[in-house]
Amino acid sequence: DAKTTQPNSMESNEEEPVHLPCNHSTISGTDYIHWYRQLPSQGPEYVIHGLTSNVNNRMASLAIAEDRKSSTLILHRATLRDAAVYYCILQYNQGGKLIFGQGTELSVKP
Amino acid sequence: DAGVTQSPTHLIKTRGQQVTLRCSPKSGHDTVSWYQQALGQGPQFIFQYYEEEERQRGNFPDRFSGHQFPNYSSELNVNALLLGDSALYLCASSLFGEGGQPQHFGDGTRLSIL
């Protein structure tokens, strides 16, 4: 299974943009890039996913490098409710199992 | 629209016992995956069920087994419980299909082994 590498922790100020990086140098052509986040005492929450092109939704944007070996989750204006552990995951084309790493713990300061 | 529901929310067992955890998928979903999350770690994939069959399995011993019912709900069974089985067990549902299917998670069952 292909692996991802993320920083253990990051800090942000409220109402500022946040860029969460992820390296996935062993990604294969059919792996989807997913981002989930997990708040304390809750299950992971789907944020966004993509294959090759950049993606936007109401929660965030996903920027994928041209060689697909890295990606960045962008939260446009961080709020206190965005404080969570963010997981970057590669999902194999068939089967759909998610292989979680350690994730990035994001803290947001008022 | 109800999301993924899991029961019970908390459970305490002793070593050697057996446990059954239950999951109802999000309305419209046909695939259920189970994950184990130890304290301070990311979730680890146990197995996935679709059309009442185990489709994929992670690196877990045979003590971990599952079942999916015709209404798409699912059970996770763990036999001969060990102290190391103490964890949060998460159920996730999705639509079966090629690639890119987001999974919707429940809030899990916290299992403690004494």
Image: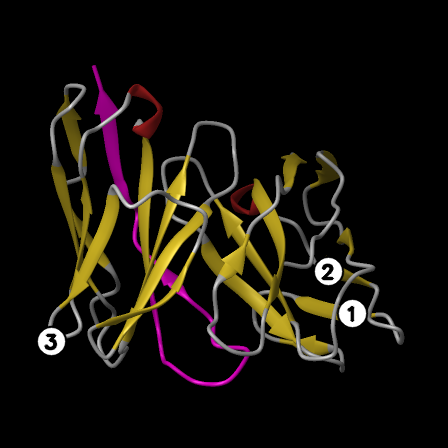
Q: Rounded to the nearest whole Å, what is the CA distance between mark 2 and mark 1?
A: 8 Å
Q: Rounded to the nearest whole Å, what is the CA distance between mark 1 and mark 3?
A: 38 Å
Badge 1 is on which residue? A63
Check if mark 1 and mark 3 are on a common chain. Answer: no
Q: Is residue B16 left or right of residue A110?
A: left
Q: State the residue lying farthest toward the top.
A: B114
Depth check: B78 or B112 in front?
A: B78
User: Contact, CB < 8 Å: mark 2 with mark 1?
Assistant: yes
What's the mark number on residue B71? 3
Please provide percent x and percent y for residue B12: 15, 24
Question: At x 69% / y 53%, what residue is drawn?
Answer: A3
Task: Choose mark 3 or mark 2, whichever is in front.
Answer: 3
Please provide percent x and percent y for residue B86: 31, 27
Q: Is residue A80 left or right of residue B44?
A: right
Q: Specify whether residue B111 is painted magenta.
A: yes
Q: Amino acid at mark 1?
A: Ala
Check if mark 3 and mark 2 are on a common chain. Answer: no
Q: Chain of mark 1?
A: A
